[in-house]
Amino acid sequence: MKRRLVSVLLLAALLFGCAGQSAPQNTETVPPEPEGTPIVEAVPLQTPVDITVDAATPTPHTPPPPPTPTPSPTPEPPLYGITIGIDPGHQARPNFGTEPVAPDSDEQKVKCSSGTIGIASDVPEYQVNLDVALKLAALLEADGATVILTRTVNDVNLSNRERAEIMNEHEVDLAIRLHCNGADDTGIRGAFMLVPTREHTQSFAENVRAAQEIIDAYCAATGLGLRKNAAILYRDDQTGFNWCKRPIICIEMGHLSNETEDLLLTNAAFQDKMAFGIYMGIIGYFHPEKTD
Ligand SMILES: [Zn+2]
């Protein structure tokens, strides 16, 4: 712009100059630029604000918080709150000391006998009992049960009375004694249950129901049969029963004196089935509505 004004002045000077030196200069025509006044081009006062963007932008919308979902109740494990005692029969070294067979009895009985042994496998009964006990405990605990094991190793010294008292101390809802049988007749086979006679228990009906549930589920899971004519035997000579004030049963899981059963009872994969069968029987005992 400044250059253009200068050009205009020059042009005017030339024009007027051409008119003659004597012609008065029209100083009014082109007023002198005030010094120091910046000449600026006309620019918009404000940089246009593109308000269309804002106008088109939807009002920020905060979505309402999602409704707090009602927590669906987690189903309780089926054995939650239930305490189950497991007594794997016998131990590595028997204890031939004696103790009263019952609280009110003068009859003495060996504290812990040696148990039987696999006729073909040579595996001792106490080992089979412990193996199945540990598998069973894991299944029960996975279902929420509190499990009381009288022993978790073979090298213990526990009498049958002491084992019963462990069940009393922990107020178990059901005590299960695990054993295998031995018979002189190697042809005898099958599983069966022992329960205390009515006079030697505080929970006869519960014991019988537990025994029935467990032996049925055990035979179904393992394919083992019932010992002939001996599904449930009622016994008054079991120290481990007579000192127990809680519901209690004993399962004889099969015969280590029978070669066929011995090789099954001492097989780890088969022991999984044994433990599962007992576990299913326990579920049936505590939740008869689930298995009927
Ligand atoms: Zn035994």
Image (cartoon, rainbow, N blue to C red):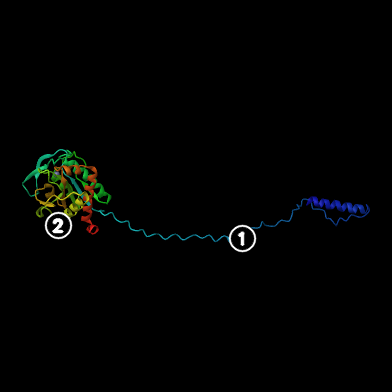
- Circle 1 crowding by C-alpha within 10 Å: few under 14, some 14–19, many from 20: few
- Circle 2 crowding by C-alpha within 10 Å: few under 14, some 14–19, many from 20: few
Residue positioned 24% across, 44% down in the render: 269
Q: Position of residue 16 (x, y in %)?
A: 90, 54
Amino acid type, callout 2: Ala
Q: Position of residue 162 (x, y in %)?
A: 15, 45
Tags 1 and 2 touching, CB below 8 Å: no
Q: Position of residue 156 (x, y in %)?
A: 18, 40
Q: Judge from the rendering whether residue 54 lies leftward or rightward of residue 247; answer left or right.
A: right
Q: Secondary structure at mark 1?
A: helix
Residue 51: which quarter of the image?
Answer: bottom right
Say if residue 171 shows up in the picture: no
Q: Judge from the rendering whether residue 31 lies leftward or rightward of residue 257; answer left or right.
A: right
Residue positioned 18% across, 50% down in the render: 175
Q: Secondary structure at mark 2?
A: helix
Q: Earlier in the sequence, mark 1 or mark 2?
A: 1
The vertical placement of 130 against 30, above or below, is above
Residue sitting nearer the eye, 13 or 186: 186
**Mark 2 C-beta closer than 8 Å to ligand 1:** no
Q: Label 2: which residue?
A: 205
Q: Label 1: which residue?
A: 52
Most extreme residue toward the left is: 106
Amino acid type, callout 1: Thr
Quarter for ligand 1? top left
Q: Position of residue 14 (x, y in %)?
A: 89, 51
Residue 264 is labelled as: none
Residue positioned 23% across, 43% down in the render: 268
Give the Cα separation between the discs numbered 1 and 2: 86 Å
Say if residue 53 shows up in the picture: yes
Q: Judge from the rendering whether residue 14 lies leftward or rightward of residue 156; answer left or right.
A: right
